[in-house]
Image: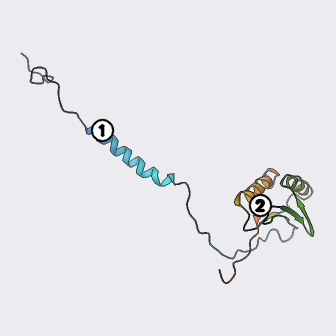
Amino acid sequence: MMHGPFHRGGRGKPMGEINVVPFIDVMLVLLVIFMITAPMMTQGVQVELPKTASEPIADIEDQEPVIVSVDREGSYYISVGDDKAATSLEDISDKVIAILNRRPNTPVLVRGDRNVPYGQVISLMSTLQIAGVSDVGLISEPPSADN
């Protein structure tokens, strides 16, 4: 009988040991991958926004801005100079396009009530972007002394 490297030394008994080194290598690689990607998978982060005074935008002082407002009830208003009119979200796009056709560099500012849902202000800004407004300014008030 020949004893070679494949001889198990018994009467045909199956070998009872498993080589686990490749399994350990794969598990360590997966552990490193998950450790690196886990911090990137966080969906929402709670952020406390700072309350700071901001400097006025110097570019818009020489031109009359278009101000689009959203009040507490969610109604939309557009004002150019002293002309203020209540309007719907669909009409805002047409009016802003008409104003920008006459005066292409007219700044567009958004005034949103602090109690208006975030989605309404975003849909207003999306409507303005579709109308061709590249930069939308947001109007805010400086913080009071008791904040």
Nearer to me, 75 or 134? 75
Which quadrant holds residue 4? top left
Label 1 sits on a secondary structure element that is: helix
Q: Residue at x 25, y 37 (%)?
A: 20
Q: Residue at x 87, y 62 (%)?
A: 78
Q: Where in the figure is residue 51, as x and y percent of width and height?
A: 65, 74
Q: Residues within 10 Å of mark 2 (few under 14, many from 20)?
A: some
Q: Residue at x 76, y 67 (%)?
A: 113
Q: Is residue 88 left or right of residue 21?
A: right
Q: Where in the figure is residue 57, as x and y percent of width and height?
A: 77, 70
**In the drawing, what numbered circle is on residue 7?**
none
Q: Residue furthest toward the front? A: 73
Q: Residue furthest toward the bottom? A: 145
Mark 2 sits on what residue?
136
Nearer to me, 59 or 9? 9
Which quadrant holds residue 140? bottom right
Mark 1 sits on what residue?
23
What's the residue type where badge 2 is placed? Answer: Val
Q: Is residue 101 above or below residue 53?
A: above
Q: Residues within 10 Å of mark 1 (few under 14, many from 20)?
A: few
Which quadrant holds residue 55? bottom right
Nearer to me, 114 or 83? 114
What's the residue type where badge 1 is placed? Answer: Phe
Q: Is residue 21 above or below residue 98?
A: above
Q: Residue at x 76, y 59 (%)?
A: 135
Q: Is residue 53 left or right of residue 128?
A: left
- The numbered mark, 2 or 1, whose residue comes first in the sequence reads 1
Q: Mark 2 or 1, which is nearer the eye?
A: 1
User: What's the CA distance linking mark 2 and mark 1?
Assistant: 55 Å
Label 2 sits on a secondary structure element that is: strand
> Mark 2 touching mark 1, by CB under 8 A?
no
Image quarter hosting the C terminus? bottom right
